[in-house]
């Protein structure tokens, strides 16, 4: 594999996803800066990052920690939860970021418009990641299972070239809409049904199979209205193939009393459905139920 010139990479929100990418990229020689709150930034600056992964092993990497972007970078990875996006973006002044490549790895589809409005000089390119990763403590990342796959929109080839040597599965797609809705068509049914029932996917499949199938079909219809190909049969097969104990991040956040990404996931589906006149009664009832829980 051809050598890749080192990049200056800032990771906004070094949690599970951001921390995993930061470790792997730093170990390949890229200059990584983690932008985070004071305590996390100080810890990363002093101690670096540590990853525990069945796929990648036990890894450590040196990285800088900072509360705010203070100098130019080649790439900004935007990786906080959608619930913390606006607050996190205050760490990245538009005049400092300039024309850098910006790649968000967030759930949902509406964040691209937010980033493009906030950073008009930057090159904002869609990204999606499929991985089960968490941050047990500052600077520490746990990667569960072996799935680690990234999809990037057109214009992010330099990041794709940097990621491939890390061992992550990387694909560059030529259709931004298909990339984002391809993930949401799978994630929304998983997140909404598991959170509503308060269980992993196994009991949902056993107890509420009809509701799961209905949400899959409705989200697929919305995706097609948005211009993305969607195959509800393939989505159901993928959901059926998940381990029974698989939990969604939304269900986990709700169980722990944390803010959930309901609006970024379910709310985004309903807003798109309304724009296109697509009826989504089961999805709407699930979102209403979860909104009522606060």
Image (tube, grey):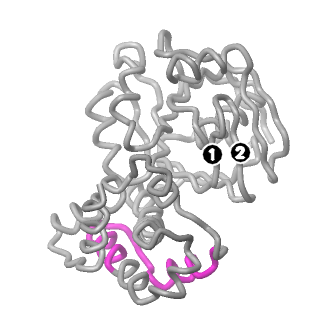
Say left or right for 243 vs 284.
right
In this figure, which residue is indicated by the disc labeled 1? 134
Q: Position of residue 147 (x, y in %)?
A: 69, 59
Contact between marks 1 and 2 (CB within 8 A): the answer is yes
Q: Which residue in the rendered view is the most extreme toward the top? A: 70
Choose the circle earlier in sequence order: 1 or 2.
1
Determine whether the residue tagged by mark 1 lies in a helix, strand or loop.
strand
Residue found 71% across the figure and 33% down from its top: 23
Q: 169 or 217, which lies in front? A: 217
Q: Position of residue 144 (x, y in %)?
A: 71, 55
Dot 1, crowdedness within 10 Å: few (<14), some or many (≥20)? some
Q: Is residue 222 found inside the magenta-colored segment of the image?
A: yes
From which residue to which does the magenta span run? 218-242
Determine whether 266 is above or below 104 in the image.
below
Say left or right for 272 vs 46.
left
Secondary structure predominantly adopted by residues drawn in magenta: helix
Determine whether the residue tagged by mark 2 lies in a helix, strand or loop.
strand
Residue found 67% across the figure and 36% down from its top: 162
**In the rendered image, which quarter contains the C terminus?**
bottom left
In this figure, which residue is indicated by the disc labeled 2? 142
Q: Position of residue 159 (x, y in %)?
A: 59, 37
């Amino acid at each position: 594999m051809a050598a890749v010139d080192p990049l200056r990479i800032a990771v906004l929100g070094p949690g599970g996803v951001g921390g995993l990418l930061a470790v792997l990229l730093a170990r390949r020689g890229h200059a990584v800066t983690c932008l985070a709150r004071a305590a996390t930034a100080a810890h990363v600056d002093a101690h670096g990052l540590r990853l525990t992964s069945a796929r990648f092993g036990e890894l450590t990497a040196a990285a800088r920690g900072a509360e705010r972007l203070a100098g130019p970078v080649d790439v900004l990875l935007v990786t906080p939860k959608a619930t913390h996006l606006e607050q996190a973006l205050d760490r990245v002044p538009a005049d400092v970021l300039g024309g850098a490549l910006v790649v968000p790895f967030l759930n949902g589809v509406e964040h691209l418009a937010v980033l493009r409005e906030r950073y008009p000089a930057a090159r904002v390119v869609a990204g999606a990641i499929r991985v089960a990763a968490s941050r047990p403590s500052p600077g520490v990342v746990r990667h569960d299972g072996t799935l680690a796959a990234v999809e990037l929109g057109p214009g992010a080839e330099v990041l794709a070239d940097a990621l491939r040597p890390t061992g992550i599965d990387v694909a560059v797609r030529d259709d931004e809409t298909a990339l984002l809705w391809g993930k949401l068509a799978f994630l929304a049914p998983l997140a909404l049904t598991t959170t509503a029932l308060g269980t992993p996917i196994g009991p949902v499949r056993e107890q509420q199979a009809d509701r799961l199938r209905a949400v899959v079909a409705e989200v697929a219809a919305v995706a097609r209205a948005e211009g993305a190909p969607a195959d509800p049969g393939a989505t159901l097969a993928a959901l059926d193939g998940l381990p029974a104990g698989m939990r969604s991040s939304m269900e986990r956040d709700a169980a722990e009393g944390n803010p959930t990404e309901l609006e970024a996931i379910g709310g985004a589906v309903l807003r798109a459905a309304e724009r296109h006149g697509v009826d989504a009664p089961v999805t709407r009832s699930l979102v209403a139920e979860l909104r009522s829980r606060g």
